[in-house]
Image: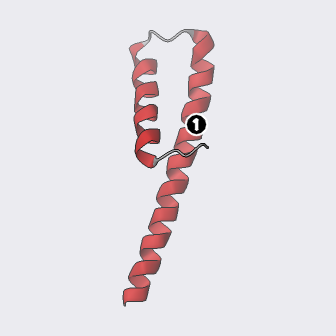
Amino acid sequence: MEKLTFTAAKKELEAIVKAIESGEMDVDILTEKVKRASELIAFCKEKLTKTENELQKILDDIV
C-alpha cells in the first residue's frame, strides 16, 4: 500500500464500516468497498504484528 499509516487505515476502515452500516451504499460500490476494507484489515494486522514483534525484541534486550 502507498505510504499509509495505521491511523489513516483505521479511519478509512471506520468510514467504510459506517457507510456499509448506513445501508445507503450502492450495491455496485459495496464490492469495491469490502475489498478495500479487506486490504485495510490486512495492513493493520500486519502493522500490529510487526509493532508487537519490535516491542518484544526491545523488551527482551532490556532484560
Disc 1 element: helix
Residue 35 in the image: state x and y as whole percent. Answer: 62, 30
Relative height, residue 47 to residue 61 (above, below): above
Q: Write down the quadrant of residue 46 in the picture.
A: bottom right
**Residue drawn 54% across and 40% down?**
40
Number of dots carrying numbers: 1
> Is residue 52 left or right of 1 when viewed as pictured?
left
- Choose top left, top right, bottom left or bottom right for residue 11: top left
Above or below for 52 versus 14: below
Quarter of the figure with the N terminus:
top right
- Hey, what amino acid is under mark 1? Ser
Q: Residue 9, percent across and down?
A: 47, 40
Q: Looking at this view, is 22 or 2 the one in front?
A: 2
* Outermost bottom residue: 63
Determine the residue positioned at 54% across, 9% down: 26
What residue is drawn where x is 48% and y is 71%?
Answer: 54
Q: Is 56 left or right of 32, judged from the image as shown? A: left
Q: Which residue corresponds to the image point at 57% horizontal and 18% vertical from the top-left?
A: 30
Is 57 located above or below residue 48 in the figure?
below
Quadrant of the snapshot with the C terminus: bottom left
**How many residues crowd mark 1 within 10 Å: few (<14), some (14–19), many (20+)?**
few
Q: Which residue is mark 1?
A: 38
**Coloured how?**
secondary structure
Measured as percent of width and height from the top left, residue 28 is found at 62, 11
